[in-house]
Image (spheres, rainbow, N blue to C red):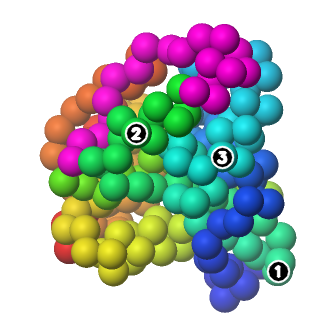
Amino acid sequence: MDKSTIIVRKATLDDAATIAQAVAMAIGDEGALRNYCGDDYTVVLTAIAHREHTQYSWQYALIAECDGSPAGAIVGYDGADLYPLREGTFATLREIIGRVPTIVDETEAGEYYLDSVGVLPQFRGIGVGRALVAALCDKAFTEGHERVGLIVDQENPHAEKLYTSLGFQRVDTKSFFGHKMWHLQLKR
């Protein structure tokens, strides 16, 4: 499959399961996923993606397709909206698993936050991740945002290389889900 077959589009409600898979891949750590969402984390993440005004809502996601099949997803939103979106996420967690985890702030006002990106295994290595990140950055800049920010695990140089190849630069460090992270930003 070549790059010309990649199409990035706005997500719909029907894409909730693909978004959930992408978020799970982005978090990556099975222990963190279970701590955050419980043992049935895929079901919980799908419920969160299915709802409006949550951190992983289909409203804030883009889907990559290759030959008409979902290949990956990316979720992003205005960092100033973290708290209201987190409340929607936490309401879903309270409803399904009966608890809310303690979590540090991963973004802030003044940046459009690339929360999660994931590419399904069979579509890796053909440019899907690059296409999703570029499309999200284009969306953010078109909407008038001056910066796009993200965090990436310091032990994932492959992901950091993708982001820096697109122009992102390190601006800070953060700790998230017990991992040391680079805070990267791309400025318009």
Binning the other alpha carbons within 10 Å of mark 2 as few (below 14), some (14 to 19) or many (20 upward) gives: few
Alpha carbons under labels 2 and 1: distance apart: 36 Å
> Where's the N terminus, which quadrant?
bottom right
**Main secondary structure along the magenta-highlighted residues:** loop
Disc 3 marks a residue whose amino acid type is: Arg
Per the image, label 3 sits on a secondary structure element best described as loop
Residue corresponding to mark 1: 67
Q: What stretch is highlighted in magenta?
A: 91-109
**Residue situated furthest bottom in the rendering:** 4
Circle 2 SS class: helix
Where does label 3 land, which residue?
Answer: 51
- Asked whether the viewer can see residue 103, the reply is yes
Disc on the earlier residue, 2 or 1: 1
Disc number at residue 84? Answer: 2
Whether pointer 3 and pointer 2 mark residues with C-beta atoms closer than 8 Å, the reply is no
Tell me how far mark 3 sits from mark 1, CA to CA: 27 Å
Nearer to us in this view, 52 or 120: 52
Magenta highlight on residue 101 = yes
